Amino acid sequence: MSMLFQRIVSKLQGLKPICLLKYCTTVENQRKIEDIVPLISKIQYNDEKNFYQKPRQVWLENLNTIEEKKLGLITLHPHIYAAAPRIDIIHQNVRWQRMYRWVSYAHTKTRAEVRGGGKKPWPQKGLGKARHGSIRSPLWRGGGVAHGPRSPTPHFYMLPFHIRIAGLMATLSIKLAQDDLHIIDELEIPSSESSYIEQLIEERNWGPSVLFIDSYDIMPTNITLATDQIKHVNLMPIYGLNVYSMLKHNTLVLTEKAARLIEEKLLYHLHRADNYKSNSFKLNQE
């Protein structure tokens, strides 16, 4: 037994240290993910010194195959895609969007519009009855309504601009945190059949309803035809992006160009010269 132990010790002493480190778990775990998967899209931001959290790294996926392929990693700005989940601001945006397109058509007639009642029903004095000038007074059954609704009644109001910007950032951040936001390279698909999109969504567990966002309003032909007959899968250009549509769909899919353009636009409005009005609503302390 002692001879066997001496042989094992002698063999271990003859090994080089590099061979031992090669199979060491601690050294293997120190490798960064960038050494295995390349960062194919990274931007140097001017305000990196004001970051209070790391930029978000997201997989870049494909659409040209049903099976999901990881093409690489891209970095996203933490002020846009890692903002505080302000549920109150999101609720204000949703209520604003639902109210500004609501027009109430409830209508009641005043005493001047109700038919009849042209003359005084009885003399002013002498009969012991209460004084009335018309049977179409609001006091009478069948008369006009004093303070009823008048159509059309719009409920439009304008939400402050900084609340709208904060709502977009909070919704994008929540979608990314819940793994409901995906970045793809482009919207080109090999088939124009609706079954291709349905199989792709089922294979990738994207949820029943999906919203595709592109940087331009002219979409590729195949995906336009494929999603035309699917009511729960919609296409939208970047200038139509809103909080209500993002919440109404389970999964949000952005092209890489759309994600960068959203970053650029929102960062501009966060750091614009007349941003002093929204200082009290900033989500990050600077």
Image: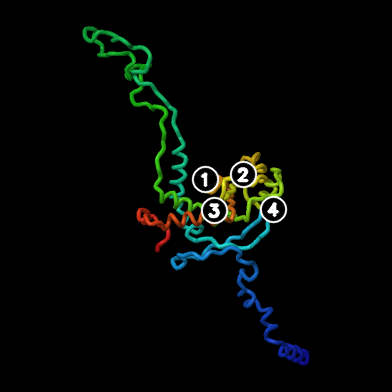
Q: Are marks 2 and 3 in contact (CB under 8 Å)?
A: no
- For numbered disc 3, what is the local secondary structure? helix
Q: Which mark is residue 49?
A: none
Q: Nearer the viewer, residue 38 or 134?
A: 38
Amino acid type for the residue under numbered disc 4: Asn
Please state the horizontal and vertical placement of residue 84, each as a whole percent of the image. Answer: 46, 57
Looking at marks 2 and 3 on the same chain, the residue that comes earlier in the sequence is marked by 3
Left or right: 208 as drawn, with respect to 139? right
| Residue 231 position (above or below residue 109) | below
Q: How is the image coloured?
A: rainbow
Q: Which residue is mark 4?
A: 64
Which quarter of the picture shows residue 111?
Answer: top left
Q: Which mark is residue 233?
A: 2
Looking at marks 4 and 1 on the same chain, the residue that comes earlier in the sequence is marked by 4
Please state the horizontal and vertical placement of residue 30, each as a whole percent of the image. Answer: 60, 75
Amino acid type for the residue under numbered disc 1: Gly
Report how far apart the C-alphas of labels 3 and 1 lie in the structure. Answer: 17 Å
Residue at x 32% of width, y 17% of height: 137
Q: Which residue is mark 3?
A: 175
| Quarter in which the N terminus is drawn | bottom right
